[in-house]
Image (cartoon, rainbow, N blue to C red):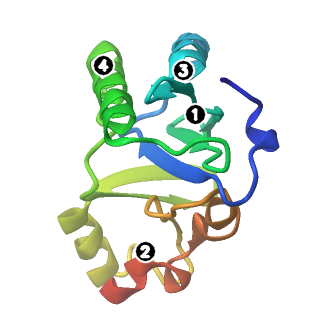
Amino acid sequence: MLVDFKELPGSSRIWIYPSNRNFTQEEQEELKVRLSSFLEEWTAHGKSLKAAFEIKYNRFIVIGLDQEVASASGCSIDASVRFIQELQRIYEVDLLDKMNVTFRQGQYFAHKDLKEFKQLVKSKSVSAKTIVFNNLVNTKEEYEEYWEVPMTESWHSRFL
């Protein structure tokens, strides 16, 4: 069952899929249709899942699941991963590589592999104040509070 993202409680499970590039306006409209369709039909052991999504900054797909209604099972999580893999293929983007770092400086976003990001830190091209996206947050509450933070407030700080 698809709901508005704002309706999800803070305890909802969150999955964040950062794209290695911005989605065009046209792609975002298509993504909204595809995501709505998938989440409307998403189930776990035959039970409808109360889920929502948002596309942030034209490049992050965020899916939320209200686990108080029903939790995702192994099969439903597998289905969501297959769906994300299909989006990768359709839009020729990378959404699943957890060894990449997305950060921003002002209004500009960058998406680098971890090795390159470490080099940027070493060369002081990014600093402790650089805004990074912690895509490892687990709940909507964490997403709202700790997803977009200065590097010093994230696991990225170990590179300083």
Residue designated by label 1: 58
Mark 4: few, some, or many residues within 10 Å (few <14, many ≥20)?
Answer: few
Mark 3: few, some, or many residues within 10 Å (few <14, many ≥20)?
Answer: some
Up/down of 1 relative to 60, above or below: above
Residue designated by label 4: 86
For the point 28% across and 55% down, which residue is it?
98
Mark 1: few, some, or many residues within 10 Å (few <14, many ≥20)?
Answer: some
In the displayed structure image, the side of residue 155 where residue 56 appears, left or right = right
Quarter placement of the N terminus: top right
Choose mark 1 or mark 3, whichever is in front: 3
Mark 2: few, some, or many residues within 10 Å (few <14, many ≥20)?
Answer: many
Q: Secondary structure at mark 4?
A: helix
Q: Which mark, by number, is residue 35?
A: 3
Res 136 quadrant in image: bottom left
Q: Which mark, by number, is residue 140?
A: none
Residue designated by label 2: 126
Choose mark 4 or mark 2, whichever is in front: 4
Pointers 4 and 2 in contact (CB under 8 A)? no
Pointers 1 and 2 in contact (CB under 8 A)? no
Up/down of 113 relative to 92, above or below: below
Q: Secondary structure at mark 3?
A: helix
- Does the image show residue 107? yes
What whole-number distance in Å separates the C-alpha atoms at marks 4 and 1?
A: 18 Å
Whichever of labels 1 and 2 marks the residue nearer the N terminus, that label is 1
Give x and y (percent) for residue 21: 40, 35
Of residue 80 and residue 99, the one placed in the foreground of this image is: 80
Give x and y (percent) for residue 139: 59, 60
For the point 36% across and 23% down, which residue is it?
83
